[in-house]
Structure formats: C-alpha cells, structure tokens
Amino acid sequence: METDLKKFITDFLNYLEIEKGRSQLTIRNYYFYLTRFSNWAKIKQPSEITYQLIRDYRLWLNRLTTHQGKTLSSQTQNYHLIALRAFLKYLAKQDIVTLAPEKIELAKTSRPKVTFLEGGDLKNLLNAPLSTKIKNDLEKIIQLRDKAILELFFSTGLRVSELSNLKKENINLNKDEFTIVGKGKKTRIVFLSPSAKYWLKKYLDQRVDLDDSLFTRYNRGKDKLSDTKQGLSARSIERLVKKYAKIAGITKHVVPHTLRHSFATDLLRNGADIRSVQEMLGHSSITTTQIYTHITNQRLKKVYQTAHDRQSNN
C-alpha cells in the first residue's frame, strides 16, 4: 500500500511535469533519487523527515558503493540532495509539515573542468566531414549533413538534445536567428553564422525526403536519398562528433558539449560579457555560466596589462 510520503512524491513529480514543464529525463532522475531516499528512510509521513535523518542519509550516500565498487562522487550525492530539497520546497508550498528545505546543505564540489577546442583543432574538426571520400549521392548528403551539424553546434552553442529535436520549419535561412525551446521549455534566441547558414542551405538543397526533421537519418544500404524515416537521435549525433574528432586527429575527449564549451569560450575571449553568454547558452542561473570564469579572468588580465601597465610605464 502506498504511504503518504510516496503519494506526495508522485504528486511532486506530476507538478514538475505539468506546472514546471520539466523534461521526462529530469522527472525520471527525480523519481530515482526520491525513491532511493524513501526506500532508505522507511518513513511514512513528511513530518518524519528531520535534520538528523538527512545527516544520516548523507552519511549513507557518502559510503554507498556502485556495482563496480566505486563510491558516489560529491556531484552525484548533490543530485540526490537537490531533488530532496526541491521536494521539500514543494511540500512547504502545500503547507505540509516537514523539514525546512534550507536545512539541506550541499557538499562542496570542485569546479567542473571545461574542455573546449580552439585554433587548429577546432578548424580540423569542423572540416573533418569534408575530408572523407564519397562514392555516391547518398554519401554526399551525409557529408553535407554532418558538416552542417558541426557548424550549427559551433554557431549556436546548442545542447545535443536541442539540436536533435530541430525541425526544418524551425530554421529560416533568410534570417540570421531562430528560436529554440531548451531545458524547462524555456525559449531563447540563437544566431546563425554565415558559415552555418551556407552549409545548412547546401544540405537542405539536397534533401528530397519528406521527413520534417532538420537532420535526418539515412539508410546506407539502400542508396536512396528519399529512404529516411526519422531524425537523428542525440546518441547518433554524439557518435558522429566523436568519429570526426578521431578523423581530425584530436586527442582530447570530444563530445557535442565540447562544441558548446568552445562556442562560449570563443564569445568570452572576443569580448562578450558573461551575462550575454548566459542568455545565449540558456542557463537559468549565472552560477552555471561561471564555469567559464577562467576565460574571463584571462581576458581581464590582458585588459589590466594593456591599460594599467601602460600608465605605470609613463
């Protein structure tokens, strides 16, 4: 029989989906984290969630090992606590007696390492699709598709899920911008570089299929441009990015998010302010964008050396 706590968890997940517009992936993750807490705590009422219970839970998480014998990282432990804190905030809004959400403190974590490409590596990756030999029209359109994908990633900083969900109707090549629906169903404007527009047009001009996806999947075995049924999945796009990184001779671990980092890094190095980059990336919090602080710090140092040192040398 479902306890009141599990019922509240179900209500909370429905609230995330309907009221907050969270993605199914987020909801699945929250379900996993909250169910793990509920199964561990063995309590029936939200009022039984106490500060001491949370302390014991944090200790249990810290000692928990995976099937591979590894402990959970501080970041993974925080994901559990963030879900629990969000749940407590929901309960507070419903006037349900429970622990105050601000009582849950997150573990300190190191700033995530930002991997990005620049210079020759970036150029080689963007040009990698053109370096492959083609034998027929099908391979030609796959080449153009993959080139357009890489250019669009670097032009817009899109997440791989955002790019894979694009439809042909989303893109108007007569304009330099289009609207994207990102995390939490939040909309933002992204911009097309001349290079991205050029390769998108070349690719779309070759399309004769009826698929409405911007980037579609082709069956190499049938050698027909019109033989397609669905768009490329995020996983397929990730595989092709890795493939072209290998072709380009890049030794770094390169995934679609690497191009997103490269997009942000390029903006900041060329004078963009971090608030503008936050908007273009679709980050809801400036804290997330601050992983690029090392880039802004380098730029500020150059500004200082140019402006201040000149005065001191006069």
Image: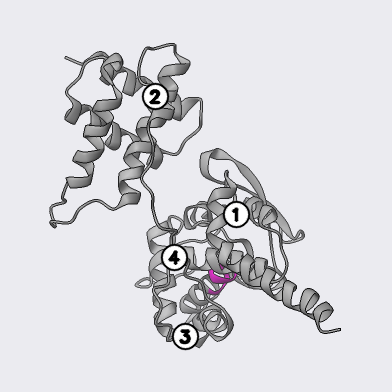
Q: Amino acid at mark 1?
A: Leu
Proximity of marks 3 and 2: CB atoms separated by less than 8 Å:
no
Which is more toward the observer, 153 or 52? 52
Q: Residues within 10 Å of mark 2 (few under 14, many from 20)?
A: many
Coordinates of residue 233 in the picture (x, y in percent): 41, 57
**Which kind of residue does numbered mark 2 sit on?**
Leu
Does label 3 or label 2 sit earlier along the sequence? Answer: 2
Magenta span: 147-151
Q: Earlier in the sequence, mark 1 or mark 3?
A: 3
Disc 1 + disc 4, Cβ < 8 Å:
no
Instruction: Classify mark 2: helix, strand or loop.
Output: helix
Instruction: Please give left or right for residue 14 compared with residue 64 in the image.
Output: right
Task: Estimate the x, y position of residue 152 in percent, counting from the top left.
Answer: 59, 66
- Which mark sits nearer the N-terminus, 1 or 2? 2
The span from disc 3 to disc 2 (Cα, nearest Å) is 57 Å
Q: Which disc number belongs to residue 281?
A: 1
Q: Say which mark, if any, is on residue 185.
A: none
Q: Are marks 1 and 2 in contact (CB under 8 Å)?
A: no
> Element type at marker 3?
loop
Mark 1 to mark 4 CA distance (whole Å): 17 Å
Q: Which residue is mark 3?
A: 134
Which image quarter: residue 111? bottom left
Q: Earlier in the sequence, mark 1 or mark 4?
A: 4
Residue holding disc 2: 88
Residue at mark 4 to residue at mark 2: CA–CA distance = 31 Å
